[in-house]
Image (tube, rainbow, N blue to C red):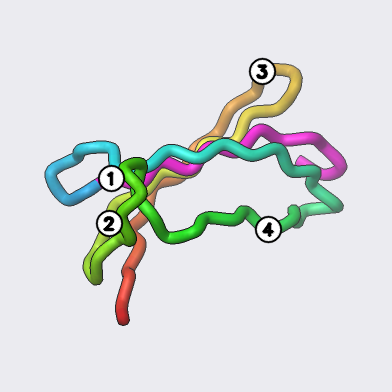
Amino acid sequence: MPDTELQVELQIFDMAGRLLRSLKQSLFSEGYTSGEFFWDGYDASGNRMKTGIYPYRVILTTNRGQMVWQAAKLVISD
């Protein structure tokens, strides 16, 4: 969705499906790209995420209420 303000939510889970961290940011898409989404590498309790594989979901929502999401896996290594 070019030239649109987007609400972006990143949800990171452990392999058992428990939500470890949820982050929300507003980004503006310039053409078909957007700015960077920042995550500090910590879970909701303030602990640094350990080496491993974590399922995650990214949810994009426009000001008009249109929503799309994508799920994948994140690999954290030392």
| Residue depicted at x 19% and y 40% | 17
- Badge 3 amino acid: Gly
Mark 4 lies on a secondary structure that is: loop
| Residue depicted at x 22% and y 67% | 52
Residue position for label 4: 36
In the image, taking residue 78 as reference, residue 18 lies left or right, namely: left
- Point out the tag, 1 or 4, that comes first from the N-terminus: 1
Instruction: Report if the CB atoms under discs 1 and 4 are less than 8 Å apart.
Output: no
Task: Specify the farthest residue to the left.
Answer: 16
Q: Quadrant of residue 64?
A: top right
* Relative image position of residue 56 (x, y in whole percent): 36, 48
* Relative image position of residue 72 (x, y in whole percent): 37, 54
Range of residues picked out in magenta: 1-13
- Point out the tag, 2 or 3, that comes first from the N-terminus: 2
Mark 1 lies on a secondary structure that is: strand
CA separation in Å, label 1 and label 4: 21 Å
> 57 above or below 66?
below
Classify mark 2: residues with Cα within 10 Å, few (<14), some (14-19) or many (20+). some
Mark 3 lies on a secondary structure that is: loop
Instruction: Report if the CB atoms under discs 2 and 1 are less than 8 Å apart.
Output: yes
CA separation in Å, label 3 and label 4: 22 Å
- Badge 1 amino acid: Phe
| Residue depicted at x 82% and y 44% | 2
CA separation in Å, label 2 and label 3: 28 Å
| Residue depicted at x 24% and y 71% | 51
- Badge 4 amino acid: Glu
Residue position for label 2: 54
- Point out the tag, 2 or 1, that comes first from the N-terminus: 1
Residue position for label 3: 65
Residue 13 disc label: 1
Instruction: Report if the CB atoms under discs 1 and 3 are less than 8 Å apart.
Output: no
Is 41 colored magenta in this rendering? no
